[in-house]
Image: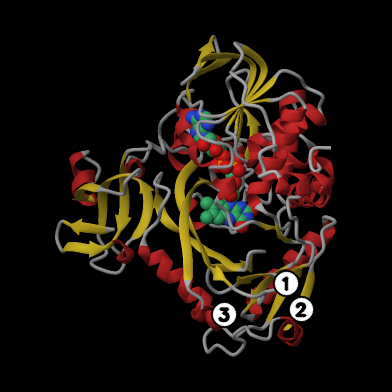
Amino acid sequence: MRYSGIKVIKEALTGHKGWKPAWREPDPKPHYDIVIIGGGGHGLATAHYLAKVYKQKNIAVIEKGWIGGGNVGRNTTIIRSNYLLDGNEPFYEFSLKLWEGLEQDLNYNAMVSQRGIMNLIHSDAQRDAFVRRGNAMILNGADAEYLDEAQIRAEYPFLKFDDQRFPIKGGLAQRRGGTVRHDAVAWGYARSADNHGVDIIQNCEVTGFKIENGVCKGIETSRGFIGAGKVGCAVAGNSGRLMGMAGMRLPIESHVLQAFVSEGLKPVLPGVITFGAGHFYVSQSDKGGLVFGGDLDGYNSYAQRGNLPVVEDVCEGGMAIMPMIGRARLLRMWGGIMDMSMDGSPYIDKTHIEGLYFNGGWCYGGFKATPASGYTFAHLLANDAPHETATAYRLDRFKTGHMIDEKGQGNQPNLH
Amino acid sequence: MIINHPLLGPRDSAEFVYMGDASLIERPDPEAENAADQFHDYAYLRDNPAGELRELWFHEGGDRSWLVVTRDTRTHEISKVELARDVARSKGRSL
Ligand SMILES: Cc1cc2nc3c(=O)[nH]c(=O)nc-3n(C[C@H](O)[C@H](O)[C@H](O)COP(=O)(O)OP(=O)(O)OC[C@H]3O[C@@H](n4cnc5c(N)ncnc54)[C@H](O)[C@@H]3O)c2cc1C
């Protein structure tokens, strides 16, 4: 056993010099059966399920920086399956079920915490919409619970119930939702994939594809050419850039989303809260910091930092529902690049180039999708057919009229 | 970000609404043979470059003009601001 109580004591007494790396650092081989581009949550999960569930061999994950340095290590760690539409809800519920068994599957403590998520309701129309969504969730086998104001007061007495503009009228709760330690997700999947023989190659940037007669034969990288039977791309915010190298234009724009964490506090916030009248969501990390965020900055960006108007807007949202947040000092803030799609829903699909597969368009909700995204992308790569929960995520759905637009916003990525 | 409006001078970007890639000015010909394909690409596909991008901003909290702003998506640095009307006219698209 790699980790045990005895080992911890022994290492503590001997200066922690005996711990071994949790995964190898192999040099790239000249050829793999399957190459995954992107060592984020989705790429690493794909490799894990390819090897473990779909019994594929000779797999590599190619990462330009270090694994977990992208959005998987930058998000606000919320997991949930509270979607409305048929194309989405079964997929996200499948993901939540995988989260529930993840730590056993990986033998890794990812700190999956089903502390519950509460979407606050501020008007009658919103109540109708949320009740409808709750029913859709229940129809798809997920859990949902409508709470009235008194019930929410009992659980969250410190919220601002009688705000003049946005009084809290109720809430839609998903008790099985919650948070997960984001870095541990990347590390857990990486260790498991590595244990199953997957080569994780870091500091290796993909700079091009070798495409001959409509067939993808491999990738050009900063560490030379790597041949591949199949190539799966899962690079989140860099999707447009990467697929551009294969001559593709995508239904995606890259936008920056910011997140914030306060100084560490004693436990004050039991679950995840979202504001229904503005865009604001907050939870408390196990270290004690209040972790929160809000809207996109709203313009195309590849800079992993945002601007001040959104900082102000997010803090106003926080003050509007949870005034005590004003007493906490902000410790850190950062940004990540989101692959915003044209209808707010993702893509898991083959491309028109044989042997080239695409996973992206996760917007700001791809962390919760990590297990199902990996599972269904692995299914697609192994079987050349979509997994039953991911049949709607086609790249050509705007052409065929099958968009999955939860918010009904149309083709304006910064509004999803 | 500060956008240097050609008529009003430097304005806070928070006064504007963002619309995206300025290629949206170039609406395809609805009479063309492959109009459906062209409109699909026009409405749904984007170049999404990391680098210089020409994009549409609407001055909603100001004089309500549309601008074409040339901005680097890696640094947010703005190198050029034009009235969208002038850009459209130069392409023969507006009166
Ligand atoms: C501030 C913020 C808050 C968020 N909050 C939530 C939340 O609460 N709940 C939720 O569900 N989701 C949330 N998300 C979204 C979620 O984090 C992402 O959708 C998800 O992590 C994307 O998938 P990934 O983990 O594979 O991406 P990443 O971790 O970004 O992985 C992509 C990897 O590809 C690599 N790459 C890129 N280009 C190349 C190349 N050319 N060659 C090789 N490698 C390359 C990158 O270095 C990167 O490591 C949030 C995101 C942000 C930024």
Structural distance between the alpha carbons of marks 1 and 2: 6 Å
Structural distance between the alpha carbons of marks 2 and 3: 17 Å
**What is the chain letter for disc 3?**
A
Which residue lies under the disc numbered 1?
A172
Give percent across and percent down for residue B48. Answer: 41, 39
What residue is rendered at 61% in x and 14% in y? A29
Q: Is residue A8 left or right of residue A32?
A: right
Cβ of mark 1 under 8 Å from ligand 1: the answer is: no
Labels 2 and 3: the sequence-earlier one: 2
Is residue A15 positioned above or below A260 on the image? above
What residue is rendered at 75% in x and 37% in y? A375
Structural distance between the alpha carbons of marks 1 and 3: 16 Å
Say if labels 2 and 3 share a chain.
Answer: yes
Which mark is nearer the camera, 2 or 3?
3
Q: What is the number of the mark on residue A147?
A: 2
- Examine the image and state in which quarter residue A16 appears: top right
- Residue A344 visible at all: no
**What amino acid type should be assigned to the residue bearing mark 1?**
Leu
Q: Is residue A83 left or right of residue B80?
A: right
Say if labels 1 and 2 share a chain.
Answer: yes
Q: Are marks 1 and 3 in contact (CB under 8 Å)?
A: no
- Residue B45 visible at all: yes
Q: Are marks 1 and 2 in contact (CB under 8 Å)?
A: yes
Give percent across and percent down for residue A23. Answer: 68, 31
Q: Is residue A87 left or right of residue A1?
A: left
